[in-house]
Amino acid sequence: MSTGVGQAATFAGADSSSEVSELSLLRNGQAYLWDLQAHRELYGLLPDLSADEIVDRVRSAGLTGRGGAGFPAHLKIAAARARGRHAVVVANGSESEPASLKDKALMLHRPFLIIEGAWLAAKAVSASKIYFYIHDYRHVHASLQRALSQLRQQDVSIEIAIAPNGYVSGESSAAVNFLNNQIALPTFSRPIDTGVNGAPTVVFNVETLAQMASIARIGSAAFRSLGTPNSPGSRLLTLSGGVFSPGTVVELLHPSPTMEVLEAAGGATAEPLAYLIGGYGGRFVPPFELLGAEENGSLGCGLVGVVPEGACGLNEAQRLFGFLASQSAKQCGPCQFGLPALQAKLPAALGTRPSRRAERSVIRLIREIAGRGGCSHPDAATAMLNSAIATFSEEVHLHRNRKCSAKGPQPVFKV
Ligand code: SF4
């Protein structure tokens, strides 16, 4: 799958044991559930739970956010309830990570699950308004609209907001800023404090909401039977980079040896040197660390990208960093000026004729930028760079000897 829109995603959980397929989010691998009756035949009716029952189930299930930060979902709900005011729910499907497609696949294939999850969240926080915040993906938009026309709830209204493209426009405060001011840039206040129209606002990733609908049906114990104690439940991954079908979306039911996961995308194109996990603003890890990341639930937005033999991880990291630097919202100095300054130093520090002086400048700039942005964007960019330098330490030595592992000009990760 190259775009994730208008094409069938691969749902790897589909062929697993009957117990697993009974519980899985993308159950039976059945594609395009655009008909309410088919959705109900597959999943059954959504139980009529009270607000307290929803909170209890989400808490005991240990559901964490699937958008990247992995924040416990019940704490977000509790914070909104503590405000004692009617809240607003934002279903965030903007998925701004360029190589990530799992949210688009979910909105395309399982729109009813997400809508039901948004209802549950709304009931838990006494919200009468839900916004779907997405980018302008025609098929996704049509899928949601078709589902919304069939599935209505009298006491909750749902609106779809189309956000402009941009890496940081998917950030939760940017979503609220857009809904308030039509400006999809991060702000310096938390949605839970100052949200849409000043109301406490909970922003949930769309996969998180679909998991809520799953928990409501199967209960927290069954949900916890998937995943690990540290990271309960199934999880959608986008397989990217050096695999034969980049952009394949799989549902990981339990941590699984890497090669088995990659099989869903036709396998790796060459022996993996490393993985990029959690998105372009995520981190590179050596192959032996991937299973641990699955077990800890530290896969961020669920992107798993293969850096195959014959590629240069340092070149990849520089390109990704350049992309991230270009996506600054230009509101904070370390982000607006620090990231481009650092980018400018990278060829001299990490290229095949590196200078020690440039290497020292890079280290200094990383230290100066980290922790000083208004949001986590510059931290994510510098952390990705640091992880590349650590993971590809052999490549650093090669470059110092004027050699490089890259076998061709083709980049592994597209920006
Ligand atoms: S750190 Fe960058 S992206 Fe984040 S708020 Fe500041 S300027 Fe915007």
Image (cartoon, grey):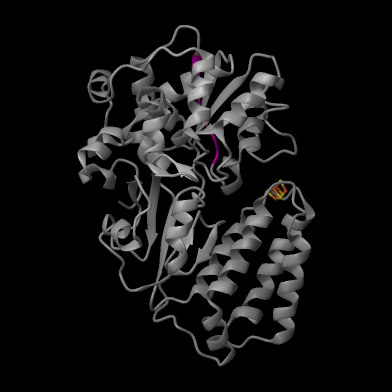
- Judge by depth and name the residue closer to the eye, 189 or 79: 79
Residue 283 appears left or right of 150: right
- Main secondary-structure element of the magenta-colored stretch: strand
Whether residue 11 is visible to the viewer of this picture, yes or no, is no
Whether residue 371 is visible to the viewer of this picture, yes or no, is yes
Q: Where is residue 172 in the image (x, y as percent from the top left)?
A: 61, 37
- Judge by depth and name the residue closer to the eye, 68 or 183: 68
Is residue 161 one of those drawn in magenta? yes
Residue 27 appears left or right of 193: left
**Which image quadrant is residue 217 in?**
top left
- Judge by depth and name the residue closer to the eye, 233 or 373: 233
- Judge by depth and name the residue closer to the eye, 282 or 343: 282
Work out which residue is located at the far bottom of the displayed protein and give it. Answer: 401
Q: Where is residue 45 in the image (x, y as percent from the top left)?
A: 31, 16
Q: Which residue is drawn at 65% across and 81% down?
A: 348
Answer above or below: position of 38 versus 339: above
Q: Position of residue 365 (x, y in %)?
A: 75, 68
Answer above or below: position of 264 versus 286: above
Q: Which residue is drawn at 49% across and 43% down?
A: 95
Report the label total.
Answer: 0
Work out which residue is located at the far top of the displayed protein and give it. Answer: 154
**Which image quadrant is residue 409 in?**
bottom left
Q: Where is residue 82 in the image (x, y as percent from the top left)?
A: 69, 20
Residue 77 appears left or right of 188: left
Answer above or below: position of 327 versus 162: below
Residue 120 appears left or right of 128: left
Q: Residue at x 52, y 42 (%)?
A: 67
Is residue 211 one of those drawn in magenta? no
Magenta residues span 157-164
Q: Which residue is drawn at 64% across and 86% down?
A: 354
Answer above or below: position of 133 versus 324: above
